[in-house]
Image (cartoon, helix red, strand yellow):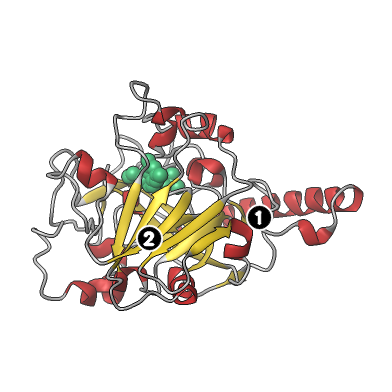
Amino acid sequence: MLLIKQAPDIKNSEVTDKEFFEQRRQFLQTAATAVAATVVAPGLLVPGTADAGEKLQNVRKTAYQLDEKLTKYKDITSYNNFYEFGTDKRSPAKLAHKMKTRPWTITVEGEVAKPGVYDIDDFIKPHALEERVYRLRCVEAWSMIVPWVGFPLADVIKRFEPNSRAKYVQFVTLYNPEQMPGQVKGLFGGGLDWPYVEGLRMDEAMHPLTIFVVGLYGEVLPNQNGAPIRLVVPWKYGFKSIKSIVKMRFVEQQPPTTWNKAGPREYGFYSNVNPKVNHPRWSQSHERRIGEDNLFSPKRPTPMFNGYADQVASLYAGMDLKKNY
Ligand SMILES: Nc1nc2c(c(=O)[nH]1)N[C@H]1C(S)=C(S)[C@@H](COP(=O)(O)O)O[C@H]1N2
Ligand SMILES: [Mo]
């Protein structure tokens, strides 16, 4: 087992993980080239026609990096919260292949100049893909360091031209009990109200840290991580980062959110990572890192706003964060 006493050696572990990443990249490139040469035209290997694990083209590196070891691909893709596929962390990786991610449409509606139903590939195409390494912190007191691939939500919002009544954006996940067994009433989806919904205030949605994600480790997003497209809002608890989105709705009133409906005393609308405001069942002051820490490892302190305070604290100036949890 790992790192009970050993001092963290960031450089060393980064090298190890990059080697792993590069080997995987090499392997997939070789595989993709072989496929392209025989069956598929190379131009088809773009997001949209690609399956989970296929390499994404033209992913730009960015300055969004962290001085922490990346969580292994295997851990990011086999320890998931995706209640549409059951409440067990291992269920999504086993069951999410049932979800069909093509064809797929995204409906844009509400207070917006360009509402419509957009094919996922047309929706993604105008945006340059970039890699951003973000910390993901679940309210259940665990975390991961994830190299996401995506693009700023702000760029998408600008395309659809919300009007001045648009104060919030609501997001909706696919509802399809045939493909998502956790949505069948009485089965193992934790009794949530389906479809899963989330929302952001417009300034949170427009913040440069907020992204739509279509990939992971340079590859097309696996279904269990929210293919074909999900949100990632790194200063908020993981549950705000809604998966497998089929609708964006621009609204004037603060929209309902799934976890707030399920347990209003436990989950508020804002859900900013805040070590000073505890959840009734899990401490928010500390966390363990998936794939590295075990039951005996010292807990890692959770930073305010998940480490993004310098960039996002001003969004909440003057707000009581104990009330607006
Ligand atoms: N549609 C949907 N989105 C969801 C969830 C879910 O159950 N359904 N779980 C959330 C929670 S609690 C977390 S911690 C993150 C986990 O993302 P990951 O599996 O990619 O790590 O997804 C969030 N998005
Ligand atoms: Mo979570």
Q: Please report whichever mark, 2 or 1, sits nearer to the chain's N-terminal start.
A: 1
Crowding around mark 2 (Cα neighbors within 10 Å: few <14, some 14 to 19, many 20+) is: many
Point out the quarter of the image occupied by ligand 1: top left
Q: Is residue 170 above or below residue 24?
A: below
Residue 273 picture location, percent across and down: 24, 57
Residue 136 picture location, percent across and down: 38, 54
Tell me what residue is drawn at x 62 percent, y 63 percent.
Answer: 122
Seen from the viewer's position, the closer of residues 227 and 56 is 227
The residue under label 2 is 249
> In the image, 174: left or right of 118?
left
Tell me what residue is drawn at x 73 percent, y 50 percent.
Answer: 28
The residue under label 1 is 48
> In the image, 58: left or right of 264?
right
Q: Quadrant of residue 233?
A: bottom left
Task: Say which amino acid is labelled 2.
Answer: Arg
Task: Say which amino acid is labelled 1.
Answer: Gly
Question: In the rendered image, is residue 5 in sight?
Answer: no
